[in-house]
Amino acid sequence: MRPVTLYFHGLPGSAAELAAFGPEIAARAQDFHVVARGGDFARLGEKIVAQFPDQPLRLVGFSLGAAAALRTAPHLGERVEQIDLVSPAAPLQLGDFLSGMAGAPVFRAALAGRGAFAALTFMQAQAARIAPARMAAALMAKTKGEDRALVADPCFIAALAQSLGHSLLEERAAYMAEIRAYVADWRTNLAKVHQPVAIWQGREDDWTPPAMAKALAGALPSRPEVTMFPGHSHFSALREYLARDHAA
C-alpha cells in the first residue's frame, strides 16, 4: 500500500508553500496532506491516526515543520515508513546556531518570555494584514543563493504572503504555541525517532544553516545522510526537493 504523505509546513507557513514554485512542481505535491498544528504533538498524533487509521505514512517536514514532524513521529510509531526533512530546524540547544539564522529575532523573543514574543508577533501581524506582499519581499531582501531568484517571482511572493497571513493572522495562537515549543529544549525527543530519516539541505541556507542539519543528523538514532544542494538556500532547497521524483 502506498503511504499517505503528510506535509508539515514551515512557520510562518501554509499549504501555499507547495504551490509557490509553479504548477509543474505543485502537481508533484498534489497528494500531500497538509497537517494543521498547534504545539501539542501527542494530540496531533491522535488526530492523524483517527484520520488515517490503516494507511502507512510518510512525513515531510520543511523548516520548522521538520521539528514538528520529528516530535509527532514517536506518537505514530511503525506506521511511519519514512521521514523526509527539508531545510530542517533542529533544537537550538544542539549548537551555537542563532547568530546564523535569519529568524533569530523571533526565536530570541520567544526565549525572552511570553510578553516579548506576543509583542513582536502582534507587530508582525499588523504588517501581514496591511502589506503582506511587501512584508514577504522584506523577509527575502537579504537572502542568499538560489533564493534570490525567488524574490523576483510573483508566484513565490504571493505564496509567501499567503503563508504570513495564515500563521500570523488566521492561526496566530497555534503559531505562537509551536514557536514556544520549538525554542524549548526538545533534544531528548530525538532519541525516540526510530523511523528512517533523510535530510535535504541548501548549502547557502541562512534560515536553518547547514551546521544545524549536520548536528541534527548526528543526534538522530538512524544517523541519516545529509544531501546538500550546492547554491541553494532555504526555500530553493524545498523547490529542489519537490522537483525530484521521490516527492511525487
Image (cartoon, rainbow, N blue to C red):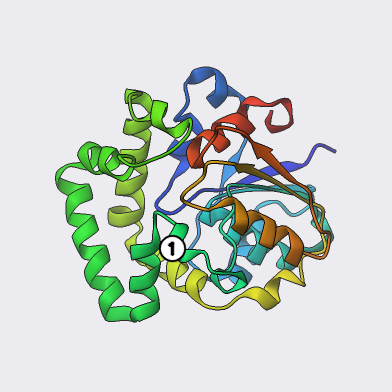
Quick one: SS at disc 1? helix
Quadrant in the picture for the N terminus: top right
- In the rendered image of this protein, does residue 235 appear above or below residue 75? above
Q: Nearer the viewer, residue 159 or 80?
A: 159
- Mark 1 neighbour class, 10 Å CA radius: few under 14, some 14 to 19, many 20 or more: few
Q: What residue type is labelled 1?
A: Ser
Residue 220 at x, y percent in the picture? 76, 64
Image quadrant occupied by the C terminus = top right
Q: Identify the residue under disc 1.
A: 99
Q: Nearer the viewer, residue 37 or 204?
A: 204
Percent position of residue 238, x then y: 56, 37
Does residue 100 lie above or below 108 as drawn?
above
Expressed as whole percent of the image width and height from the top left, the position of residue 176 reads 38, 67
The percent position of residue 73, horizontal first and vertical second, equals: 71, 62
For residue 48, side relative to residue 39 (left or right): right
Q: Which residue lies furthest to the top in this view?
A: 24
- The structure residue drawn at horizontal position 63% and vertical position 71%, both measured from the top left corner, is 42
Give the residue drawn at x 34%, y 80%: 112
**Residue shown at the point (51%, 48%) measured from the top left:** 9
Whether residue 29 is visible, yes or no, is no
